[in-house]
Image (cartoon, helix red, strand yellow):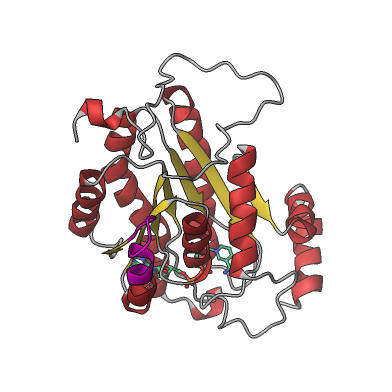
Amino acid sequence: MSLQAAKVGASGVPKVSTAAPVRRRWGAPLNQPMRNWQGRRVWLIGASSGIGLACAKALHAAGAKVVISARDLGLLSEWAEACNQQEVTVELLTLDVTDALQVKYAMRQVAANGPVDLLLYCAGHYRAQRATAFDLNDMLRHQEVNYSGLLRVLDAALPLFLQQGFGHISLVSSVAGWRGLPNGLAYGPTKAAVTHLAETLYMDLQDKGIGVSLINPGFVATPLTAQNNFQMPALISPEQAASDMLAGWAEGLFDIHFPKRFTLWLKLMRLLPYRLYFALVRRFTGL
Ligand SMILES: NC(=O)c1ccc[n+]([C@@H]2O[C@H](COP(=O)([O-])OP(=O)(O)OC[C@H]3O[C@@H](n4cnc5c(N)ncnc54)[C@H](OP(=O)(O)O)[C@@H]3O)[C@@H](O)[C@H]2O)c1
């Protein structure tokens, strides 16, 4: 894509690059609020089901041109075909984030059709694991999908975003990455890494005109959590999660966490000394 083309948003609206250091008024949103999705182009990776798919549908309904990636997009072809008979398009692009060549190829495909206003990394793998049944292969699988896959995507996407001088990168992490939790031996550390990465990306990209946000859902009813054999507190639907994400982007938040009735308690627990934290987790989970 030529630099000239890259300076024009997917909507055809010329974008202003904010290459000069950004001085934000205290209390101002940490990101440029994203409210109008009409004609914006968004790439959602890990969106064949659950939160990613609900988000794709919500963004499409708001007028965005949506590109959806995951390994298995078969179930979406009918919906995409129906959408493509209307004005606002849905592109399906098969992608396994554990394969660096596929990621690079997919990025080229996406870039060939125009600039990207939002990249959402939503691909995730979760299996409950405890230290008493340590499974190295599954530990590494979590790392491959949840963290290394994201690094591969950033490796391919950052040059494009830097060349564009605009756009927003949003990473789906989890409250499970905030502190250690039982059953989270494999999953939790990968999400802690995503959170840390997002914080650093924000600081590196804020002066380049590129927004970064972090999505921290509590429990959402998706195929990923269907394996949980306990009653999930404050469980919400993927549609509610998507609506909270769009609200967070509209406010220009960096940390988009939901549902608040659950995440605010966990934020408080983040501050507790270990002795108290371990005792409370044991009491609440029985583990
Ligand atoms: N559900 C929750 O309570 C919850 C809470 C906090 C955070 N999260 C996070 O939210 C994100 C979405 O999860 P979800 O709950 O919506 O579960 P989900 O419905 O299982 O979605 C996971 C998505 O990741 C894709 N994926 C998995 N491996 C992939 C790979 N190698 N390459 C490309 N795509 C891959 C899956 O598609 P394919 O299988 O077709 O590839 C699917 O689209 C994940 O990052 C998860 O960790 C979920």
Rendering coords of residue 172 (x, y %): 51, 55
Image quadrant holding the C terminus, namely: bottom right
Image quadrant holding the N terminus, namely: top left
Q: Is residue 114 above or below residue 245?
A: above
Identity of the residue drawn at 74% across and 72% down? 233
Identity of the residue drawn at 28% across and 65% down? 96
Identity of the residue drawn at 35% across and 34% down? 12
Magenta span of residues: 80-90
Magenta stretch: residue 60 in it?
Answer: no
Q: Nearer the viewer, residue 92 or 256?
A: 92
Q: Is residue 180 visible?
A: no
Q: Is residue 62 left or right of residue 43?
A: right
Identity of the residue drawn at 66% across and 52% down? 257
Rendering coords of residue 57 (x, y %): 49, 63
Rendering coords of residue 110 (x, y %): 26, 50
Q: Is residue 202 above or below residue 279?
A: above
Magenta stretch: residue 81 in it?
Answer: yes
Q: How many marks?
A: 0
Q: Nearer the viewer, residue 68 or 283?
A: 68
Residue 179 found in image quarter: bottom right
Q: Is residue 164 visible?
A: yes
Residue situated furthest bottom in the rendering: 229
Rendering coords of residue 214 (x, y %): 55, 46
Q: Is residue 211 left or right of residue 264?
A: left
